[in-house]
Image (cartoon, grey):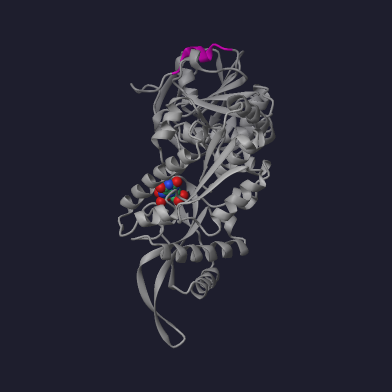
Amino acid sequence: MDKILILDFGSQTTQLIARRIREFGVYTHIIPGTTPFKDADLSGVKGLIFSGSPYSVYAEDAPTLDPDFLNTDVPVLGICYGLQRMTRDLGGKVEKKSIREFGRSSVTFTHTHPLFTGVPEGFISWMSHGDSLDALAPGFRLIAQSENRHPAAVAHESRDLVGIQFHPEVSHCQYGTEILKNFVLGICNADPQWSMEAYLEEVSVELREQARSKPVLLLISGGVDSTVVGGLLLQALDPEQVHLMYIDTGMMRKGESQQVAKTLKALGAKNLYLIDASGDFLPALSGIADPEEKRKIIGDMFIQVQEREILSRNIQGSLLAQGTLYTDLIESGKGIGSKAQVIKSHHNVRSPLIEAKRARGEVIEPLGKLYKDEVRKLGITLGLDPEVVYRHPFPGPGLGVRILGEVTREKCDILREADGVFIEELKRRGLYSEIWQAFCVLLPVRSVGVAGDAREYGYVAALRAIIRSDGMTADVYPFEMKDLLEISAMITNQVGAIGRVTYDISSKPPATIEWE
Ligand code: XMP
């Protein structure tokens, strides 16, 4: 399959470049910008992109580029730092300018170029730089400039080397997608073969080669990633060799365990172990109010239960499949793209038994090339129920971190019911898909209320609904007051133990999404 290789110099938008290009059907792969040329896998590579960076090219610790990447016949697009890196390495000059360009900036062409096919002569780009090109490298000419008359785009006279100072991957950049398409489909002539169907075919062949006739074990959390891996294994392999284990901690959402079982059975699961471990988890949490202590107890209990169940079913020799995503395997941002071996395991828990499998190379990660939204597409392609595929995320410790203070079975039941009403109402009102994550929290206070003529002393539930802009920040969903009032009344009417409902209006930061 044709691919575009992105050399990441640590820009916050490297992931965005990769996703934009995948969106129009060409597979992308990100490697650290400092990777030696001999270590890069260039099979199928039709073009190279050098990303931006928080560094200046003349900084002492600036990430360097192996010059061999500039000596191939493969077309190159340098973006921001990528352009400056290329310019400096090929004999041009980069300097700090008195006028820095951040945000919107209009760009006009000085020469026509295939990079700008279909783009009007003046358009609004998005810039983020303090350094600019002072002298172009030999063989290059200017093809566009910014409103401050700084070079905005350059191209080599005889080779397919182009560079742009602005960021086409950012949604504020007009014609950004067209410019990336012109490079990838036009200049690189890459064939847009990346689709979920193609991926499914490719990954199925790989899975069969990896697993052969060995048993494969997958720990299912109820979340979309592990469920999609389950679907994939059942479709690609003989369902008899696939062992699926789901541990119900007693702190799952309403209907979650039943839905997981139904989904996997519908996909042909033969060896499905649904373990009700609430009798292990809930007593272990008795009397514990400290959030960190609760997390640790839950994490340790996962390890104990997993190991016990794996041994009791005599499946400890199986290969282990995991729902690790592409984003879990690469580090973006400040780490200059260095490969972080961040391996996500079930509920963020690493058991010694499972770590030993990893050390022996017995771990299969079939989602390792995908982004989260692509996993959802794959789930749909596999025929998974859209309700499962588009379910809001749920933290590993489950309701355990949404019941503030001590966790008891009674409180789990109350919260599960209240959360169930909230989620059901969001779906009925067509709001569920607009919201990134919504849930109820059970507060550790009781408050006075009246029901009929009687005085009641009920629990207080807080509703949380957020729109996430990225991993680090979150905005509160701006409900219509009517929706909130009606949902509040439904919760107090249907869940007798709850006497009062509040809406959490704190953004992240300073608050976090979860309360504990
Ligand atoms: P916070 O509360 O840190 O949450 O703003 C950010 C996202 O992470 C989820 N979350 C977790 N997920 N194990 C998980 O698998 C955990 O321990 C955990 N804690 C928080 C949270 O639901 C939100 O989506």
Q: Quadrant of residue 1?
A: top right
In percent of width and height, residue 484 lies at: 51, 69
Horizontally, residue 370 falls left or right of residue 307, namely right
Work out whether residue 153 can be spotted: yes
Q: Is residue 344 magenta?
A: no
| Residue 473 appears anywhere in the view | no
* Residue that appears at 36% across and 75% down: 447
Towards the viewer: 283 or 416: 283
Residue displayed at 47% across by 86% down: 452
| Outermost residue to the bottom | 453
Q: Is residue 425 above or below residue 173?
A: below
Residue 91 % position (x, y): 46, 13
Q: Does residue 196 lie above or below 426 as drawn? A: above
The residue at the point 30 percent across, 60 percent down is 287
Residue 27 percent location from the top left of the image:
61, 29
Q: Is residue 68 magenta?
A: yes
Looking at the rendered image, the quarter that the C terminus falls into is bottom left
Taking the spot 39% from the left edge, 56% from the top edge, the residue there is 282
Closer to us: 106 or 219: 219
Compare residues 472 and 77 and report the one nearer the observer: 472
- 420 lies above or below 385: below
Per the rendered image, the range of residues in magenta is 65-72
Task: Give coordinates of residue 48: x percent, y percent.
Answer: 56, 22
